[in-house]
Amino acid sequence: MRIETKCIQSGYKPENGEPRVLPIYQSTTFKYNSTEQMGRLFDLEESGYFYTRLANPTNDAVAAKIADLEGGVAAMLTSSGQAACFYSIFNICEAGDHFVCSSTVYGGTFNLFGVTMKKLGIDVTFVDPDASEEELNKAFKSNTKAMFGETIANPALVVLDIEKFAKVAHEHGVPLIVDNTFATPINCRPFEWGADIVVHSTTKYMDGHATSVGGAIVDSGNFDWEANSERYPGLTTPDESYHGVVYTERFGKSAYIMKAIATLMRDLGSIPAPQNSFLLNIGLETLALRVAKHCENAKKVAEYLSKNDKISWVSFSGLENDKYHKLAQKYLPNGSCGVISFGIKGGRENAVKFMDGLKLAAIVTHVADVRTSVLHPASHTHRQMNDEELKAAGVSPDLIRFSVGIENADDIIEDIQQSLDNI
């Protein structure tokens, strides 16, 4: 099936007489007739459902759809994108370990990795995504377990050279984890460029309507954990908490996701409510249509902004003069996303005046849904960062993150113009 069809048909296959639409299994528990069968479920010897924190039919159907969209072998839903990012690293790192991460990742991810995970004893080195292979190699240590980046950085809109990052990661025997939230699998499938794990904040384009917070982790099944068994004992040696199961032996290419479900979800939770997964699935059904419209509108808005004499700079890889246009042509030939970053002459003060003067676009701590929204990262999502960290993340004081919705593009442009006219 082509990807537009997968958005609608994947994940849930109703049998004769079953509901045409994915049901909401709003139950914490599932009944069995024998203690023996329940025991086999707890020992991972049999597949099935017994407690929603570990698995739920609604959640699993949506996870399977996202895995299919990305071209992966398995996926796990989480209660938020932050949880997905955390679990993606914590599934293979423990106290004393280290990983490498692009410095331009979303501010919340930067704080998670650079502050909170350090308290757990897991260290990180942030690197310039535009650095050469030689420079990236210098960030690796003997205890490095992973490399992390974003397909399109939020909000700097840096386009990641996935092949370069994958090459470096694999030379050091570690997987590349890519946050594909902004591009979505409609515009980029990182596994096809060498990435091993993909994460999403499904809260954004996948849900698309600002109704449900959620996240997802997708495993390509391509990384050879056993070839690097000494580095990943959690996957390749017996897990005493599950009677000695070895995940790579029991689950093969799905070992990474099965470990995440069996240990992280068991011990930490962060499973999405089935109701939220149901709403996410509705969003996924129109993902291909919406992403195309977001990209079409964003290009029109970006072209308008680039010609406006009150705008000092525009960052949007769909523009031919953009720094990342060449990389976007390679990885994102059908369009990048609906988000634009730009600066207004007059700096931070005029940026605030502009945002306060908008009528159609809303100031919200959100991005990538059907409604046009705007945010000032230095004042909002990245306000915990100091000036040096903001610079490393590609966030200047005047940067405005403008998420173009699927309204009529002319109405969006008129709203921008009327606000600029009052500065």
Image (cartoon, rainbow, N blue to C red):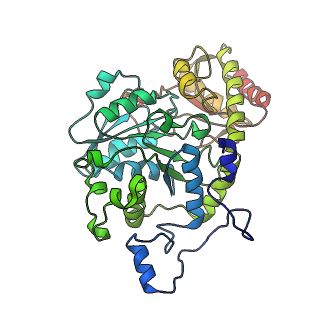
Quarter holding the C terminus? Answer: top right
Residue 272 seen in render? yes
Residue nearest the viewer, comparing 88 with 185: 185
Q: Position of residue 375 (x, y in %)?
A: 58, 36
Q: Is residue 213 left or right of residue 406?
A: left
180 over 312 or under it: above or below: below
113 over 423 or under it: above or below: below
Q: Position of residue 64 (x, y in %)?
A: 56, 55
Occupied quadrant, residue 125: top left
Quarter holding the N terminus? Answer: top right
Q: Position of residue 384 (x, y in %)?
A: 42, 40
Residue nearest the viewer, comparing 3 with 177: 3
228 over 357 or under it: above or below: below
Determine the residue positioned at 48% across, 45% down.
199
Determine the residue positioned at 28% across, 28% down.
137
Determine the residue positioned at 30% across, 23% down.
135
Residue 389 seen in render? no
248 over 402 or under it: above or below: below
Occupied quadrant, residue 15: bottom right
Q: Is residue 283 left or right of residue 255?
A: right
